[in-house]
Amino acid sequence: MTVVPLAELASTVRSKNAGVLHVTFDVLFRDHRAYGLAKASGALSRERLAALYGLEPEQIVTWVFYDPGLAFKFTIRRRQPAGTPGEPDPFGSQLYPPLFDVQIPVASMEGDER
């Protein structure tokens, strides 16, 4: 089965502060095909994302595919409040890189041309 990293299908992958207790992640896709591949793959499931970030699935407080915007978004509960001693990223802006390498299967699509 052919797979491609999420970074090849997305035009934007970002994370940002969503208040003192949360960080939100946005993945915006290049086109309908890329969005459809990612959505249908199951690679962005709540359980897989939780494992990727070392969380329990219930620590992902929102998880949604947004068809009109060709986007995927999820929000996690921080391990500790933003700005407290030892908290590694108070702005939440550097937490997205693990998403780049999430593998999305593409073999199921006819005429796959990346």
Image (cartoon, helix red, strand yellow):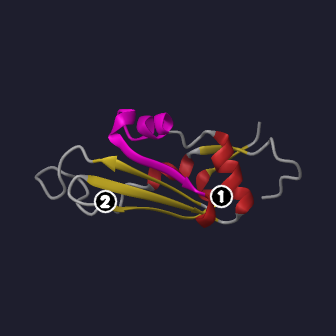
Residue at the outermost right position: 111
Residue at 15% from the left image edge and 58% from the top image edge: 83
- Left or right: where 3 falls relative to 82: right
Q: Residue at x 88, y 48 (%)?
A: 110
The magenta stretch is 46-66
Q: Is residue 55 visible?
A: no
**Would you say residue 15 sits in the magenta stretch?**
no
Viewer can see residue 10: yes
Q: Quadrant of the N terminus?
A: top right
**Residue labelled with disc 1:** 9
Query: In the orientation shown, which residue stands out farthest toward the left?
Result: 85
Bin the neighbour count of mark 1 within 10 Å (Cα to Cα): few under 14, some 14-19, many 20 and up.
Answer: many
Residue 58: name its quadrant.
top left
Residue to which mark 2 is pinned:
92
- Residue situated in front as seen by the camera: 66 or 5: 66
Three-letter code for the amino acid on which mark 2 is drawn = Gly
Image quarter (top left, top right, bottom left or bottom right) of the C terminus: bottom right
Q: Residue at x 26, y 57 (%)?
A: 89
